[in-house]
Amino acid sequence: MANFKTVVPEAMKTNYDVFHFAPATVIDNRVYASGQIGIGRDGKSPENLDEQFTLAFESVGLVLKEAGATFDDIVEMTTFHIGLGSHIQEFIGVKDRYVKEPYPAWTAVGTTELAIPGAVVEIKVIAHI
């Protein structure tokens, strides 16, 4: 495979070892980031949605930085939501603190369950560096 690199920020090494997935891979000039859930230092998703969304975006930022990218480099974003209709406006408010114009392509998907109990959003991105 051409120029393939696994991206594992130090703070995510345990997840890499335990769950056997990379937070991101880089192939040539593309970063393919795995979905990130807003998790506090206690390993749980906070009930406060603004805090949970912020933590998820902070994790995305950590992965992007380790890969040599920033939020400005995102070309596509996919988000998975439990209760999409009830919190989409609050999510957009947090998203807009991180993702600026020109906005990337974005698909928001409603779902019934995520990997961490209490999580209501997972954010997956592709970036170009």
Image (cartoon, rainbow, N blue to C red):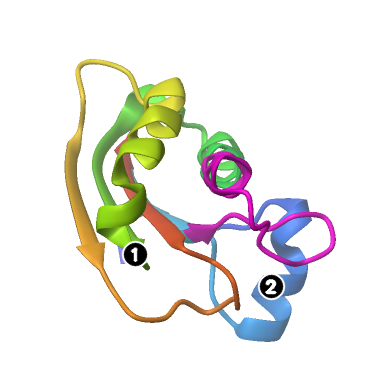
Q: Which residue is mark 2?
A: 15
Q: Secondary structure at mark 2?
A: helix
Res. 34 in view: no
Badge 1: residue crowd in 10 Å (few <14, some 14–19, many ≥20): some
Badge 2: residue crowd in 10 Å (few <14, some 14–19, many ≥20): few
Question: Which residue is pictured at 62% across the width and 83% down the height?
Answer: 19
Give the amino acid at mark 2: Asn
Identify whether 111 is placed above or below 54: below
Is residue 81 rendered to the left or right of residue 39? Answer: left
Question: Which residue is pictured at 46% across the width and 76% down the height?
Answer: 114
- In the depicted view, which residue is nearer to us: 36 or 1? 36
Is residue 75 rendered to the left or right of residue 90? Answer: left
- In the depicted view, which residue is nearer to us: 124 or 109? 109
Check if mark 1's residue and mark 2's residue have beta carbons within 8 Å: no
Q: Which residue is mark 1?
A: 83
Task: Report the span colored magenta.
Answer: 36-57
Question: Which residue is pictured at 71% across the width and 60% down the height?
Answer: 12
Identify whether 57 is placed above or below 70: below
Between discs 1 and 2, the one toward the N terminus: 2
